[in-house]
Image (spheres, rainbow, N blue to C red):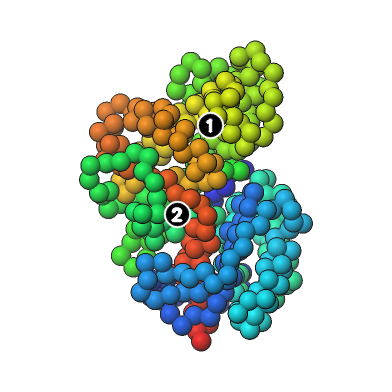
């Protein structure tokens, strides 16, 4: 299951909250509310408030990152966060929190958030009832990250492919590998931006050379449909490594994605180095395809949990070569910059900003 969807779910949202919404950048006088970003590996939870006239229209009042595997479920983490608030200057506000913006990997089906990369099921009703949250809005995690990129300054990202001129106005592609492969497109608007969700990670993997054809052949032994997520993700790194060990006639000795990337960065394991080479090459091809598909002239932001850790390797890899290898469209791609961002708090900021821009905070002013 990919980390993206085009579904939003709003629980207990009166119709009056959905009309004539003020922009997040103009938000002022809002009561604090919860915002959470839940991925397959980490959950980031914050107490936030809207800020008027600032480049970052969301202020994080209190923030904590959780390892999902260490907790029995999302409700338990939210309970722990609320307990932590009791020891902060926001203890009084804690008793009045009735709203939550939740960015989560997967998609909403009835009461559940569906995603096989999460370590436990997520019940929307359980969260509402156990925490007493009357208004819960759910957005996909990569949609939230995409939404947050409109607040990013040039100093908050690192260049991967630079262009001679500023990006043209237009769609901005945001994608990245982590526990899964997320992707979304920010569509700038005059009043508020919109986010186009995507299941691009489930597109069939397209090899770009003979070695990648061999890799695809072996990956297809396990399943008829091999997606880009099967290679461009944490689990995908492990699959690539094991297949390449088989092709090289060696025994796999590394058992986690972190061990593979660590060995490749240290140049201490030939199969790990080739794994990361193939990973970056496939990523370059895929990003170039998505830029052309969405005509993302506004640029590309690479996010996710893996890429910031391998930045030196990525910059020295064939990523750019494969990104530009689109025949007559190379000239177009040379106008589209690619930058690397830390996922960090962006999902929380994006979920909160989307929450305010959609009007879910109306009627909750101080």
Q: Compare marks 1 and 2 and give the one earlier in the sequence.
A: 2
Mark 1 to mark 2 CA distance (whole Å): 29 Å
Q: Position of residue 232 (x, y in %)?
A: 54, 35
For disc 1, the neighbor class at 10 Å (few under 14, some 14 to 19, many from 20) is: some
Residue in the foreground of this view, choosing between 201 and 131: 131
Q: Is residue 145 above or below residue 124?
A: above
* Image-quadrant location for residue 21: bottom left
User: Is residue 232 something that shows in the picture?
Assistant: yes
Q: Where is residue 11 in the image (x, y as percent from the top left)?
A: 61, 69
For disc 2, the neighbor class at 10 Å (few under 14, some 14 to 19, many from 20) is: many
Q: Dot 2 corresponds to which residue?
A: 146
Residue appearing at x 55%, y 45% in the figure: 305
Q: What element carries label 2?
A: helix
Residue appearing at x 48%, y 47% in the figure: 303
Q: In this view, does 9 lie above or below 200?
A: below
* Image-quadrant location for residue 225: top right
Residue in the foreground of this view, choosing between 175 and 242: 242
Q: Dot 1 corresponds to which residue?
A: 265
Q: Where is residue 249 in the image (x, y as percent from the top left)?
A: 65, 12
Q: Is residue 14 left or right of residue 119?
A: left
């Amino acid at each position: 299951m990919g980390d993206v969807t085009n579904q939003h779910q709003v629980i207990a949202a009166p119709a009056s909250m959905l009309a004539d919404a003020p922009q997040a950048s103009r938000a002022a006088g809002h009561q604090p509310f919860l915002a959470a970003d839940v991925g397959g590996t980490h959950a980031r939870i914050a107490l936030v408030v809207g800020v008027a006239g600032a480049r970052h229209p969301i202020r994080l009042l209190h923030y904590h990152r959780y390892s999902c595997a260490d907790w029995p479920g999302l409700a338990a983490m939210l309970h722990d966060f609320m307990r932590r608030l009791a020891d902060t200057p926001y203890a009084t506000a804690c008793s009045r929190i009735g709203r939550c913006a939740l960015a989560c990997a997967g998609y909403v089906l009835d009461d559940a958030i569906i995603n096989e990369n999460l370590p436990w099921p997520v019940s929307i009703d359980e969260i509402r009832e156990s925490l007493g949250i009357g208004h819960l809005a759910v957005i996909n995690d990569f949609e939230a990250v995409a939404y947050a990129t409109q607040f990013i300054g040039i100093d908050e990202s690192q260049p991967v492919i630079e262009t001679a001129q500023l990006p043209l106005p237009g769609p901005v592609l945001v994608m990245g590998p982590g526990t899964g492969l997320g992707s979304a497109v920010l569509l700038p608007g005059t009043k508020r931006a919109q986010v186009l969700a995507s299941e691009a990670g489930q597109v069939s993997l397209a090899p770009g050379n003979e070695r990648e054809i061999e890799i695809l052949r072996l990956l297809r032994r396990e399943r008829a449909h091999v997606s880009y997520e099967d290679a461009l993700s944490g689990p995908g790194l492990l699959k690539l490594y094991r297949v390449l060990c088989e092709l090289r006639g060696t025994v796999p000795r590394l058992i986690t994605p972190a061990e593979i990337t660590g060995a490749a960065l240290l140049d201490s394991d030939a199969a790990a180095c080739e794994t990361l080479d193939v990973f970056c090459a496939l990523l370059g091809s895929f990003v170039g395809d998505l830029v052309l598909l969405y005509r993302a002239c506004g640029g590309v932001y690479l996010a996710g949990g893996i890429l910031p850790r391998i930045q030196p390797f990525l910059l020295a890899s064939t990523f750019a070569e494969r990104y530009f290898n689109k025949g007559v469209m190379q000239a177009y791609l040379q106008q589209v910059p690619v930058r690397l961002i830390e996922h960090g708090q962006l999902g929380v900021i994006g979920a909160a900003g989307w929450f305010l821009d959609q009007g879910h905070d109306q009627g909750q002013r101080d």
